[in-house]
Image (cartoon, rainbow, N blue to C red):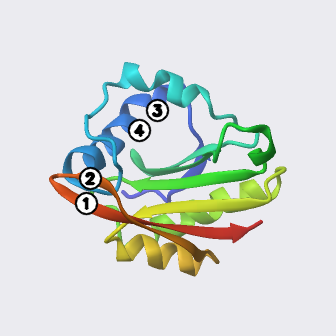
Amino acid sequence: MNSAPVIRHARASDLAALTHIYNHYVEHTHITFHVKPYAPDERREWLAQFSPSGRYPLLVLEAEGLLGYAHATRMNPRKAYATSVETTIYLAKGGEGHGHGTLLYSALLAHLETRDVHRAYGLIALPNAASIALHQKLGFEKVAHLHEVGRKFGRYHDVVWMERAL
C-alpha cells in the first residue's frame, strides 16, 4: 500500500538517507559541483546548521522512505545578507515527474515566508531544464548567468541565478 507523501522537518536519523540522495547527484550529474561523495558522518555539521524554528530549514518529503529534501542556507556569511537565502532541492533517483518537487519546494517557500527572509535564490548548473521550469513555476526569475563557472566530468558548465521575492 502506498502512503501519501508527508513533508516534515529533517531529523538526525535522516542523515544516511539524505546523504544517499545527495551522493547520487555528486557521482552521476553536474547538478552539484561537489565531486567526491560523502559518508553520512561527514555531513553531520551540514545537518546541524538547519533549524525547524529558524531562518534556515531542511524539509524532507517522506512516503515509505525519503523521496527528497529541500533547504535554505545563508547566501553569504556577511551579516547584511542574512535575509537572503540560497534554496536547494534534491529528489531521490527516479522521483522526478511526480509533482514531488513542486510539493516540497512550495512547502519550503511557504516556511520561508513566515521567517525574516526577503529574497530566495536558486543557483542552477546548466543544462537543467527541469529545475529552470520548477523555479519559474514557483515565481523565480532569472537574474544572472555565469558562463563556464564550474568544471565537472571534464566539461565546463554555466550557472544561472534565479530570484524570488518573499
Q: Earlier in the sequence, mark 1 or mark 3?
A: 3
Nearer the observer: mark 4 or 2; the answer is 2
Rendered location of residue 151, percent (x, y)? 26, 53
* Residue positioned 65% across, 43% down in the render: 76
The circle drawn on residue 14 is: 3
Q: Which residue is mark 2?
A: 151
Amino acid of disc 2: Arg
What is the spatial separation of the Cα atoms under label 4 and label 2, in whole angstroms? 24 Å
Q: Earlier in the sequence, mark 4 or mark 1?
A: 4
Q: Earlier in the sequence, mark 4 or mark 2?
A: 4
Nearer the observer: mark 4 or 1; the answer is 1
Q: Looking at this view, is 162 or 6 the one in front?
A: 162
Q: Which residue is mark 4?
A: 18
Residue 53 visible in rendering: no
Q: Earlier in the sequence, mark 2 or mark 3?
A: 3
The circle drawn on residue 156 is: 1
